[in-house]
Amino acid sequence: MRVLFFAQLKDATGCNAVELAAVSPLNTPQLWTELLQRFPALAAHRPNVRLARNWEYAAPDAIFADNDEVALIPPVSGG
Amino acid sequence: MEIEIQLTDRPIAEKILPPGQPGAVGAWLEFRGVVRGEENGQAIRAIEYEAYSEMAGREIRRLLQEISARHPCRAAKVIHRVGVIPVGETAIYVGVASPHRGEAFALLAEFMDRLKQDVPIWKRRALPAEDESKKNHAPLAPSLSPLGGERVAARPGEGKFASKNSLVSLNEALVEIRTHCQPLPAVRTPLAEALGRVLRETICAPEDLPPVDRSTRDGYAIRADDASKTFSVVDTIQAADWKPRQLKPGEAVRVATGAALPCDGLRVVMQEHAERDGDKLQIVRPENSMNVRLRGEEVRQGRPLVSAGTKLNAGALAMLATVGNVNPLVSPRLRILHFTTGDEIVTPDQTPKPGQVRDSNSILIRSLLQNFPCDVEQSHLPENFELAKSEIRNRKSQIENAAVLLVSGGASVGETDFTRALLEQLGFEIVFNQIDLRPGRPLIFGVNGSRVVFGLPGNPLSHFVCFHFAVATALAGLSGGEPPEFLRGQLAEKLDDKPCPRETLWPARWEWNDATPRLRPLAWASSGDITCLAAANALVRVPANQGSIEKLTGMDFLPVTAMIGGGI
């Protein structure tokens, strides 16, 4: 699955996006485990980050499948 | 509620037209969020915004729909600028139309609050104010120049109009044209009339495509986890059938290629790999392939299919038909009025007397406009100013209804003065009347409200050049589409020239050479030279004071649509 990073999360991870090879669909805690393993610096941001799945905010019980586009949304500041 | 959403990296227009017909709404409320000169106590010169565009557009739409259920409004338009936005310029524009002001105020206030919580757009960084001494070195405007080349630091279109003679560079001209040519109100149009129009809303997949699992073979559907060797055939499904049912282990369904499978989790055994005897089925050859096109394999529900700003081509229209979007919101068909002037002109079927020339500009302009969805009317104006004035008085309503007016003038200074005087007579304000460019120097650009006019220098080559960089940019702007863009290519031959103090758009012929466009410069002697036009399919941008340029040098060029349909 493709995971996108925005704003300060780009600085934390050093990239815009990453391809996660998920063998089976992941729930939210599993997804975070995968991400933190790869990018420990995300830990500090986790409390403030919302997850989006296929261009919508994901519910807490969302399941993330291999062909989903996932995005980590830090607090927004548009307008 | 009609909703229009744009994310753009260009300046947001000073004036934006309300949607819908006058009379249908009683309130048109507008809000602009502008960049403040300080951030956290520090003086700044700009803020850089970042957006997750695909999601931001959807989230804005979702918020508007949710809030309008409580505060019903007729239409809303949201434009958020991203990239580097200088202090004092608009970061967000929101316009709301409603029958009465109360709903509009309520919707707008709530929308802005929610936008700041939910829409994935970020202030990425503030750019600190600079020392005066450094000011000249860092032009701010980001990607203001889709036509390539250097950035433009000057702010265009701030109510200053040409006094007597206003000479602009090619880049300045393009910025002026883009600034003054804002998208006209969008319309809903049947698919059959939408070819070449600019889509003004993003179309998302209303459901998964395909909406169900489909067989890719003639054969038998069985459960993917079924290890049975023999099966009983319980049903037959043809390509057009929809017969949902759960399959038990040991059950098989006869399916045709393209048939909708009766439930999830099935695979298809090719008929060649099975033997059937009445209702009994036996698999005779094991098969690794699923032979199933999975639900959502092509497109997932909610996935943007065609983005706002796309010029609709045949494939995009087929896509809209597939998802049942038969009345997309698109740019309007443009009305264009073209006048030729000059008493020396005779129609092409006549034999010119000494001093006369055949009119080639009418067919040139008409043909070039074939690439744009528009209605073109053409006529001729006499050179005598009083006669011309009375002629335009007769055509007053025609002129007022035209989104774009094109006037083909002569090439001399006297004739451009004539064109200019005519345009001022018609109420147009002249934005510039000369461009530092060869050919095409006496190009005039004027505006009157949302209507625009070009006075095109009379020579056919100048017409050709001015149309492709200036008129095409205006038509794209009025339609809400992407302006023409310079590409990078390589000279196939030496470009032979003396240094010219003006920039040049040099007629050329381009073709692919492996992955690189190769440009062959065409010979032309003057702006009256028409011989190269039949072959030209590119304009190479030659910097001022350049002189000859060696073979294989990398150059910017504008591909031009010499053939019908080429621009679609």
Image: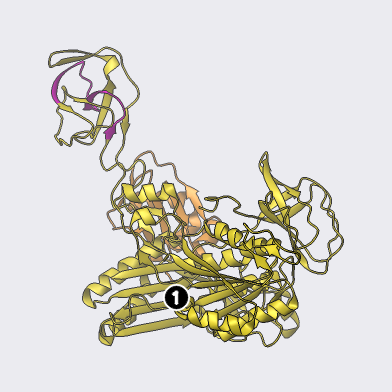
Residue B226 lies in the magenta stretch: yes
Res B388 → quadrant:
bottom right
| Residue B359 point in image, percent of width and height | 64, 62
Q: Secondary structure at mark 1?
A: helix
| Residue B43 point in image, percent of width and height | 60, 85
- Look at chain B in the picture and name its colour: yellow
- Residue bounds of the magenta highlight: B214-235
Kindly identify which residue carries mark 1: B401
Looking at the image, can residue B239 be seen?
A: yes
| Residue B32 point in image, percent of width and height | 44, 82
Q: Residues within 10 Å of mark 1 (few under 14, many from 20)?
A: some
Q: Residue at x 59, y 53 (%)?
A: B561
- Look at chain A in the picture and name its colour: orange
Give the camera-side residue of B348 and B511: B348
Quadrant of the drawing holding the N terminus of chain B: bottom left
Disc 1 residue type (three-letter): Asn
Residue B184 lies, with reference to residue B550, above or below; the image says below
Seen in the image, is A54 located left or right of residue B170?
Answer: left
Give the camera-side residue of A30 and B301: B301
Res B355 → quadrant:
bottom right
- Number of numbered discs present? 1
Residue B274 lies in the magenta stretch: no
Seen in the image, is B342 located left or right of residue A15?
Answer: right
Chain of the residue that carries numbered disc 1 in the rendered image? B
Looking at the image, can residue B432 be seen?
A: no
Give the camera-side residue of B140 and B323: B323
Give the camera-side residue of B377 and A65: B377
| Residue B156 point in image, percent of width and height | 62, 79
Q: Residue at x 15, y 35 (%)?
A: B243
